[in-house]
Image (cartoon, rainbow, N blue to C red):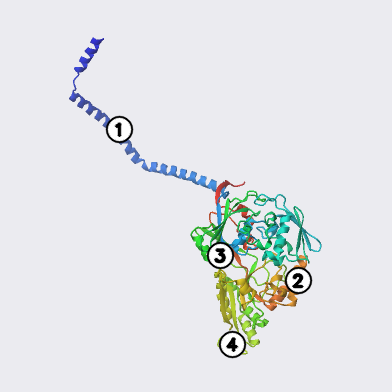
Amino acid sequence: MADERERTWRQFQKLNFDSKKLSKRMKKAEGATTRHAHKFILTRLDNIRSARRQIVGWLILVGCLIAAVGLQLVWFQKTYLVKAADVGGTYAEASLGPIDTLNPLYATSSAEVAASHLIFSSLYSYDETGHLSGDLAESIQADAEGKNYVVKLRPNVQWHDGAMLTASDVAFTVNLIKNPETRSPLRLNWQEITVKALDDTTVQFSLPATYAAFPYALTFSVLPEHLLKDISPAAIRENSFSRAPIGSGPFTFRLLQQANASGHKVVHMTANENYYKGSPKLNRFEVHAYASQDDIMKALRTGEVTAAADISSMDAARVDKHNYEAASHPVNSGVYVLFNTSNTFLKDATVRQALQQATDTKAIRESLPGNMPALDLPFVNGQLTGTDIPHAAAPNVKNAENILEGAGWKLVNGVRQKDGQKLSLKVTTTKNDEYEAVLEKLSGQWRRIGVDVSTNVIDTSDPSINFVQDTLQRRDYDVLLYELLIGADPDVYAYWHSSQAGIFGYNFSNYSNPIADTALASARSSLSPELRNAKYKSFARQWLKDVPAIGLYQPVAQYVINHHAQAINTSTKLVSASDRYANILYWSVNEKSVYKTP
């Protein structure tokens, strides 16, 4: 064995490296490789060049087929898939403050009212069509005289702390409003009404006289008796409940945050999973209260909020269309020129009639963005029915001049004068881009007939100014450009009946006419819709004749929202801007793709 290995080793040692043979073999391999390359590659490249058009054509065809398949897939998705609201997320809404309280008995600013609507429930609220519908209430029944109303409540409604809401809570809330120690601005509407809980789900209201519009008064927020019954009514406003409320609405209070020193506050709320109408899609809701419309516009520009209310039509036209869209919703209010009939010159109805003839309301509306609906009556459009609805006379400058001339007002150096006195009027309004634009247009129209017009714009955001006490209650104006909230029912008794002309009344014109008084009183005490309609037409005719005010337009609520969010529907009809939450359960900031229902 060892010998064999030795012979093999010696044979291997005898092998010699022959470079000539290796070179010869390499050249042979090179030649073979070149022949194969020429045969199988180069010759075929020539064939490809000759067929390149056909190849390119086939490649284009294949590309088109792939693109068609892709387009078909996209088309299929668009046909059978749709974007829908998804659950979760935080919705941040800007509105005008301040927020001094979260107790709905004292809510006055837009932000306070918004928070009240989200945290608390009411017996009735307005749905997306603008009609009154049950919230806590399941039904309402009135007796034949319309003096007693029995309301049946939903069973099993819970407060945010888990306690049950009953008819006793409703009675407690009304009695709290009525108590003068509570100091609620709602008191005037409830002084002579008694309320009693008949059982846990039944409450009775007793009125001193027939009042056809009473169901519309049942939109107040209900408070929890079990949390407030031991607190003195005089201490309710300052109680901790007003800073950390417990309600029964779709959102529960979590935190009131002081965002900065300029007055920006944020009410943080979370979805009420035990809400009797179902849990909202949103996880959280934030009400951001700002001191001015300029602050709201800044918040939109910086993306601090999802949406914004309480901005003028002029501001809404200036929002960034790439990120937001603005929608206009007419509300049941009217913007009027209110004449203080106690004024030396405006006591004379002929002067008021001349001013009405000189006022081109169409030109005023057209000067504003937002397509403001026309309004020339003390009612909202559609509240009177029939073919004999009265309307204001068309503007006529020549008639206005003739009326003043006939009343002894002569034109001297461009200004009307009588008995040595100039026809001078001061028009007052609140600081607002929209109102200030109207004021400028209106002043120009009146100056054209010789009226010496001065203007007074009051900044209600100034903490040193109390507009209600110093201006409205004192009637410290000759003419007031102001918005009157009319509501869903045409009962305008509070604005035009002579009994409401005192310091605490809302008859800002101090208007008094026995025919108008009789029509207003009769209409509100009748349960017949036909009779009420006839009485209100009678009042409207007298109102147009006496001209205690000029209707300019029906205002619209502007709502600006981010493109990625879903909230108030464009078809929703609003009684007031705060009624935008009718479909709050379906608001969202998240989206998902879902298949369409076949």
Horizontal and vertical percent position of residue 247: 65, 55
Q: Residue at x 65, y 72 (%)?
A: 376
Q: Mark 3 highlights which residue? A: 311
Horizontal and vertical percent position of residue 480: 61, 75
**Nearer the observer, disc 4 or disc 1?**
4
**Earlier along the polypeptide chain: callout 3 or callout 1?**
1
Gap in angstroms between the C-alphas marked 2 and 3: 36 Å
**Earlier along the polypeptide chain: callout 1 or callout 2?**
1
> Observer-nearest residue: 452 or 71?
452
> Observer-nearest residue: 124 or 2?
124
Q: Tell me the kind of residue under disc 1.
A: Lys
Checking the image for residue 411, the label placed there is 4
Q: In this view of the protein, can residue 418 be seen by the observer? A: yes
Do the residues under discs 1 and 2 have CB atoms within 8 angstroms?
no
Q: Quadrant of residue 464?
A: bottom right
Mark 3 surroundings: few (<14), some (14-19) or many (≥20) residues within 10 A? many
Q: Tell me the kind of residue under disc 2.
A: Ala
Q: Mark 1 highlights which residue? A: 39
Q: Residue at x 60, y 90 (%)?
A: 420
Q: Quadrant of residue 141?
A: bottom right
Checking the image for residue 291, the label placed there is none
Horizontal and vertical percent position of residue 451: 59, 82
Badge 4 marks a residue whose secondary structure is strand
Q: Tell me the kind of residue under disc 3.
A: Ile
Q: Residue at x 70, y 70 (%)?
A: 494
Do the residues under discs 2 and 4 have CB atoms within 8 angstroms?
no
Badge 3 marks a residue whose secondary structure is loop
Q: In this view of the protein, can residue 560 be seen by the observer? A: no
Badge 1 marks a residue whose secondary structure is helix
